[in-house]
């Protein structure tokens, strides 16, 4: 539950050795403004009136229109792009930026705001089948310096993005929170917007939202150019595919008394095995929310039971009935590991604690951490996460290793939303190819279970 209190009015602050997260809602006076950014220009928009009541939808709309109309020209210097740079480079640039009094005030206003709203410029038109993937990239990184990446403050915990073509989403900074509290907020917002607003807008004229000023020195300009170049390289390298698997959703595995998450994870293993002829270290995040300040541990989806199943799928000498039984066993093994992980009994966070303790105490690191097997186990070619939502949406993220995949999914009742990412610079990985194998694995597994029903005792 703690994470729900960390999302609003918080921001990541770069530091020379390590960053910190500051939560301004915990001060004596909680912030009453949001930041709005349009054409790389930042504005402070107060969302509470002087008597403490929140502005109505109509009032907020009027204020957003004022911002829009006073920022029609794109600012020459996209100051927000600085936040996309490597943390060490950004920390130096940050200290340099806030030496100026005006800059410091503007930065503090952004950091203290409840959240940020990014009003994005239109992106190039694409065909319908590419549209979802293009929007996902737009939400994740803004498309590069030519498009909307300067229309962000990536250190801000929560940024809502609305583009001119109506596509919308959000990007969030991971340090304060996991995905589920963000999705819970998103579901709440979507439900809230369906209800009619019963409050009448007061006739009181509202002041013009304050534009945040920045004094750009030649040194800051160089930092911006450096950030642009680095970001564009990363944007060019990330391949992201959003697919909607229409054949079935979570209701099918449920009808077979199989956990939908376990079913999808085993399908992912089958897809990977068919592509590469082996399994790989797989990370699936497990929520430790039953512990105070709990974050995540790792569900290691590549198990011995999963290996037996995926190998059986290409073995002609194994009957389908046995393959179906191996599939059920594999999903059960995944379910068991998940239950173990959410109770704090998985291995990864314990090992991390041991390693960090050794570093902190300046004692020699245990030999286990120097072992090749440990390096292989920690090289997650598949980094995955189920982020279920009531809203028909999907979360997305990049791979965690250069030759890996990032796979996020939201199983709906009758379809599954997937976001699959890979790096273009790796010739071994391909997001579209992975999504093709993933779809095939899901269909083959359904057919196997339907053709070989579990015998009723």
Image: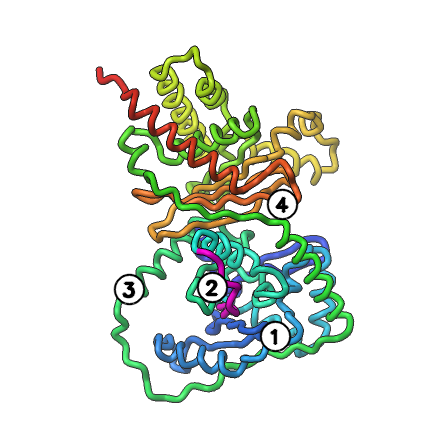
In the rendered image, which residue does mark 3 sit on? 194
Tell me the distance, in whole angstroms, between the alpha carbons under discs 1 and 2.
Answer: 19 Å
Q: Earlier in the sequence, mark 2 or mark 3?
A: 2
Location of residue 306 with respect to 142 vertically, above or below: above
Q: In the rendering, at what x and y percent does residue 19 appear?
A: 65, 55
First along the sequence among labels 2 and 4: 2
Q: Which mark is residue 160?
A: 2
Q: Position of residue 224 (x, y in %)?
A: 70, 66
- Circle nearer the viewer, 1 or 2: 2
Residue appearing at x 42%, y 23% in the figure: 330
- Quadrant assignment, res 199: bottom left
Give the image location of residue 245, x and y in percent: 38, 42
Q: Could you say which disc has been placed on residue 209 in the image?
A: none
In the displayed structure, does residue 170 sit left or right of residue 51? right
Q: Nearer the viewer, mark 4 or mark 3?
A: 4
**Residue 372: horizontal and vertical position, in percent?**
69, 26
**Residues shaded magenta:** 117-127
Q: CA distance from mark 2 to mark 3?
A: 18 Å
Q: Secondary structure at mark 1?
A: helix
Dot 1: within a 10 Å radius of its alpha carbon, few (fewer than 14), some, or many (20 or more) residues?
some
Separation of marks 2 and 4 at Cα, in angstroms:
28 Å
State the mark number for residue 424: 4
Q: 177 or 444, which is in the foreground? A: 444
In terms of depth relative to the viewer, which is nearer, 324 or 159? 324
């Amino acid at each position: 539950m703690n994470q729900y209190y960390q999302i609003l009015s918080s921001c990541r602050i770069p530091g020379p050795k390590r960053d910190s997260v500051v939560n301004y809602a915990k001060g004596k006076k909680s912030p009453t403004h949001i930041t709005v950014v349009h054409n790389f220009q930042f504005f402070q928009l107060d969302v509470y009136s002087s008597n403490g009541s929140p502005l109505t939808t109509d009032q907020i709309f009027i204020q957003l229109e004022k911002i829009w109309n006073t920022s029609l020209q794109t600012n020459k210097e996209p100051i927000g792009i600085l936040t996309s740079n490597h943390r060490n480079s950004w920390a130096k640039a940050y200290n340099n930026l806030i030496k100026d009094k005006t800059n410091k005030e503007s930065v503090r206003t952004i950091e203290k705001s409840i959240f940020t709203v990014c009003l994005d410029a239109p992106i190039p038109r694409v065909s319908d089948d590419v549209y979802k993937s293009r929007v996902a990239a737009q939400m994740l990184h803004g498309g590069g310096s030519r498009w909307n990446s300067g229309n962000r403050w990536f250190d801000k915990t929560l940024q809502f993005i609305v583009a001119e073509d109506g596509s919308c989403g959000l990007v969030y900074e991971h340090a304060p929170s996991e995905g589920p509290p963000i999705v819970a907020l998103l579901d709440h917002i979507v439900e809230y917007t369906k209800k009619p607003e019963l409050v009448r807008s007061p006739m009181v004229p509202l002041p013009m939202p304050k534009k945040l000023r920045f004094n750009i020195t030649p040194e800051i300009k160089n930092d911006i150019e450096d950030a642009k170049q680095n970001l564009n390289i990363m944007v060019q390298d990330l391949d992201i595919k959003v697919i909607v698997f229409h054949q079935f959703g979570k209701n099918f595995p449920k009808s077979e008394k199989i956990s939908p998450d376990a079913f999808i994870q085993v399908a992912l293993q089958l897809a990977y095995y068919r592509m590469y002829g082996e399994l790989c270290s797989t990370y699936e995040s497990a929520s430790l929310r039953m512990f105070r300040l709990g974050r995540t541990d790792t569900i290691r989806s590549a198990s011995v039971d999963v290996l037996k199943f995926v190998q059986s799928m290409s073995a002609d000498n194994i009957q389908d009935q046995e393959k179906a039984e191996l599939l059920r066993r594999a999903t059960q093994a995944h379910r068991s590991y998940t239950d173990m992980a959410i109770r704090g009994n998985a291995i990864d966070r314990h090992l991390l604690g041991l390693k960090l303790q050794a570093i902190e105490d300046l004692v020699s690191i245990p030999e286990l951490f120097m072992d090749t097997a440990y390096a292989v186990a920690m090289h997650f070619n598949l980094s995955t996460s189920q982020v279920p939502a009531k809203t028909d949406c999907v979360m997305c993220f990049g791979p965690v290793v250069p030759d890996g995949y990032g796979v996020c999914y939201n199983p709906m009742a009758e379809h599954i939303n997937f976001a699959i990412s890979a790096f273009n610079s790796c010739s071994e990985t391909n997001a579209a190819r992975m999504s093709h194998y993933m779809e095939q694995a899901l269909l083959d597994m359904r057919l196997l279970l339907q053709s070989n029903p579990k015998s009723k005792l």
